[in-house]
Amino acid sequence: MNLIRNKTVLHGAASMAALAIAALAAPAQAQEAAPDSEEAAQTIVVTGSRLLSAREAEALPLRSISADELEKQGSPALIDVIRALPEASGSIGNSNSSQPGKGQGFEGSESINLRGLGPDRNLVLLNGKRLPLTSGFFVNTRNIPSSAVARIEILKDAASTTYGSDAMTGVVNFITRRGFEGLEIGGDYTMIDDTDGDWRMDATFGKKGDNWDLLVSAGYQKRAQLRVKDRPWSTPPYSVNPDAGWNFSSNPAQFTPVGLVGPAGTLAPTGVRAVDVGCSALGGIQPFAGFCVNNVQLWQDLVAPAETWQVYSEFNYDFGGVELHLEGYYSRMETRVNYPPSFNQPKPITETVLPAEINPASYTAGTSPRLFGNWFVPMTNPGLASYAAANPSQFPAGTTGVFIPIGQWRPYLVGGNPFFGDASTPGYQGREQDEFRLSGALKGTLGETTNWSFDVTYGRNKHYLYGWDSSGVMIELALRGLGGPNCKWQTAAPGSTGCLWLNPMSNAIQSAPINGVLSNPGYNPAVANTKEVADWLMIKQERFLTSQIAETNLNFDGTFAGIDVGAGPLRWAVGGQWRWIAFNERDSKFADRTQVPCLNSPLDIPGANVCTPTPYTPLGLAAAFAPTDIKTNVFAIYGEAVLPLWTDSNITLGARYEDYGKDGGGSFNPQARAKFQILDWFGLRGSASKTFRAPPQTSLAPNPTASIPNILGRPTALDLVGNPDLEPERATTWSVGALVSGSGFDAAVDYYHYDIDNILTTEPQNAIVNALFPNGATGANNCGSLDPAFIATHFQFTGACSAANLSKVLLLRINGPKARFSGLDMRASYRTGGVVGGTLTVGAVANVTLSYEFDGFSVAGLAVPGFDAVGKLNAGTLAHTLPKWKLNTFVNYENGPVNLRWGGRYYSSYLDQRQAATAVGYSIPGQFLHDVAVTVQMPWDVTFSLAVTNLFDKDPPLARLPEGYDAMTSDPLGRTIRLGLRKSF
């Protein structure tokens, strides 16, 4: 560690010591009041039912994780709890800035993905009420006020009957503390190699009166930046993992010398394609002749730095027969996402900014203004002239300039970009979120057997995204000496007053510290690029995304003594719900395609916004969007009945009718559950239901979700385009399980099965790309044989159809094939006392996915074969990463004030089906990671914790992805050590 980081660690230790001193100075009077367990078991209604109490919860495949249990684990961060859940796969949490639909654009956010079918198919609640979505997609669990949470309940079963269509794969309910009185403060610091470490601090205050109580809790979390270059395993040599950030859009790059030797004196090659001699000198590689390749991932982060602030409060008042509950929270999150100093520029150049000597036959047919697939740099460019003088063998007689292929060069890379800072400073984007939710409820009784409740909830998430990109026409003007805000480029002489040059050659670069190169022997300070031209070229994009949710429920429940089979009367509940869901997007000028529909739109000339094809937005990789405002009203009625049969046995029946109107129609969804206690130690349970899911608003909207995945060996723009014609998906689910308990042993196993019709998804990337390029980037393609309409709607090129000219892939959101998946959830634990004076508990929770099958289907006339996603990486397919096995196991020993815990986290190996069986990265090994934690209850109500995760400091296994590993499954941190203190007053 360097001095700065050592100072940070010392500061963290000092802060912990100060907290300990404060704790020891004041003896505590307040503790969290533990409600009578029998009363709690009778009255607390569990997640997934409006009637079942905690004692009857075994009728549901429900897992509860208490704050006490998390404390014994060393109080892990919420994201670590979520990612370790065996029931979840493919949850977003680390940077994932290169994975479309799996984190890109949501850096700093955290999701829950039950069953691996997508975070938008499970419902996340706070105290049983909905939370606003981030960008209309999923609940960002980072915004949940974790310091106020008493337990997390995970229902691993469809719950649309109880909650609505967004609970297809289950529900995760965060339940806040009850009965707390006093003051509690706490914090922890996590040491992570090569970072400043993670911080968490929180404070909770509670006060109780005779008929009221108040809770206020506030928290702060700071997640440290982990740079790619600080984990060498992430960027292995090109020969080992060519997909781990190695990019053919480089600087230095390659060029072809040209002169006026073509037909009618037009520009044509005067020599062969050449690589800038500065490529190797500045740390680049040449894996193929004629290409300079650099690793762009080195500029990025494996974990984006983020800060989050939260405050939560609730108030309860008993009026004597009527109870009032009010709660609210506010959260703010800020994240900085590092990127290379400039993006690849894959879009063609318009004839408007090119010299008249371009051969007309070189332009793309059917375009207006005509489009050209090369940058042109005249020999009068001072940087090119200086470079040519130093390297004359690359420039035959008659050369008047060079062509640089579109998509194979970018304005700034290894030498940094003066717009952002010095040569070591990456480019960056920002993600900010402001979120709040307010909820109020009243409940009371009608007579002796009927209860009523009424609640209203409103929440809003504002997601602000910003970044910078460049326009191809502006870059071309600067290459010709006509750049800058004060240049009258249509009449001015190149390089005249107010007109700026952009030097594309390596002699503009003084050093490449990102590649470990501190001095460039070919550097010429006289032709270095200026901050002035960089400031003009870098154009800011801003997106303002607002998601809102409003919900109101009116419920009645009671008993019906007329139906009683001996274990108690039938219990019933009925109610109605109204939900309002809204999504709004507005964007800055250069993020709004209604304002900048054409490549020429940045130019202040007549007709700049008239073009064919249109829209063809001007910035390189950044997508442009349209203003969007979608509002949906949902109405529902529901009912539930529980019939007790005998001790700990019951049947539950429920049904819900929900109407989404024009955005999804209506659906009737019945459900049946049963629990049969066969013997004192053995029981059976099962469920069956029909459920549906309406299309998310963001899937109906015309705006694309933009990303930059690796396609055909290089990062390429990818747009997932909305589809207003989507229909709801519908599912039939059932499960059956067995329960065993007695003499300290407790176990359960559940088999679950889903059949989904009309699954909401996107056209599969691999199938679409392989249809046109079945032999990859270098083999024969189907440009001449595939349906031209199919090509036009799915691909954009800088010139003629070819892998080299591919600039963007477009995938439509669709209703896909029939899907079936099934698996087993298993848990077991054994607890015994009298072990060296203490209590020993051993246990395990596991999930095994047995099948995850998608039928074959047709997309735009293209036959897409079916597949089974189990044990696969599933990159570019309809599924998320899906190891067959996930397991958590533990041994816990508690003796008086001391708790010792060992935990193991395991996932099985899986395959990258894109690779040949003999290729590196085809088989991704599984991992078993060890964690240990010590918790000590010290005098004066102080709790000390020490936790070490990934005890043996294992690196994640290699995967053929830009990050070098699978960020949806593995952890890039290595060994971490967390120190925590908590004090009650």
Image (cartoon, helix red, strand yellow):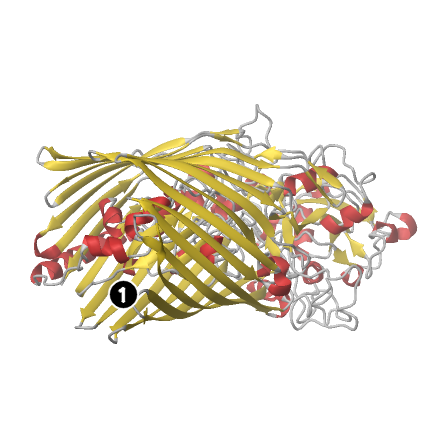
Q: How many neighbours does mark 1 have within 10 angstroms: few (below 14), some (14-19), or many (20 or more)? A: many
Q: Position of residue 952 (x, y in %)?
A: 30, 33
Residue 429 at x, y percent in the picture: 51, 59
Count up the numbered dots: 1
Q: Nearer the viewer, residue 441 or 171?
A: 441
Instruction: Examine the rendering and report whether any part of residue 775 can be seen.
Output: yes
Whether residue 341 sits left or right of residue 570 in the image: it is right
Q: Which residue, as the protein is rendered here, is positioned at the far front?
A: 562
- Above or below, comparing residue 415 to residue 838 in the picture: below
Q: Quadrant of residue 273?
A: top right
Q: Position of residue 546 (x, y in %)?
A: 52, 67
> Would residue 889 be seen by someone viewing this image from the given angle?
no
Q: Residue 846: percent from the left, percent from the top?
A: 37, 35
**In which quarter of the view is residue 888 placed?**
top left
Image quadrant for the C terminus?
bottom left
Residue occupying image coordinates x 57% and y 26%: 919
Amino acid type, label 1 = Ser
Residue in the picture at 44% in, 51% down: 653
Tell me if residue 123 comes above or below residue 783 in the rendering.
Answer: below
